[in-house]
Image (cartoon, rainbow, N blue to C red):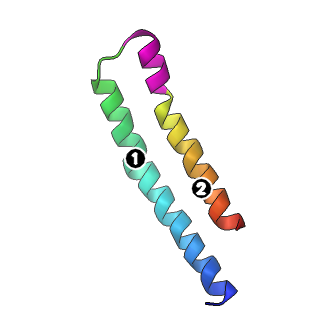
Amino acid sequence: MNKKGQMGGRVMAVIFGTILLIAVAIPVTTSVIASANLTGTTATVVGFIPLFLGLAGLALSAALISS
């Protein structure tokens, strides 16, 4: 496969992954956390999970595009 085809595949993977993360993973995680009725330190720590999902998606996007 040529360089142009590889880059196109990576861009499509980033687009698909971003849509999946933003439209499915983060909203579902947020909904589950909200319905879990957590309090205190546990709620604080678990509340960071959507943030970490977003950061992981950003890092994956950067890794796919730069390689």
With 34 as the anchor, is 40 left or right in this view?
Answer: right
With 39 as the anchor, is 5 left or right in this view?
Answer: right
Name the residue that disc number 1 marks: 25
Name the residue that disc number 2 marks: 60
Placement of 6 over or under 15, stated as above or below? below
Q: CA distance from mark 2 to mark 1?
A: 15 Å
Residue 52, quarter of the rendered image: top right
Please identify the quadrant where the C terminus is shown.
bottom right
The question of residue 24 being in magenta is answered with no
Residue 17's spot in the image, x, y percent? Answer: 48, 60
In the picture, the disc for residue 2 is none
Bounds of the magenta segment:
39-47
**Mark 2 surroundings within 10 Å by alpha-carbon count, few (fewer than 14), some (14 through 19), many (20 or more):** some
Q: Nearer the viewer, residue 33 or 23?
A: 33
Residue at 31% across, 32% down: 32
In this view, the residue farthest toward the top is: 40
Q: Nearer the viewer, residue 42 or 31?
A: 42
Residue at 66% across, 85% down: 4
Residue 63's spot in the image, x, y percent? Answer: 66, 60
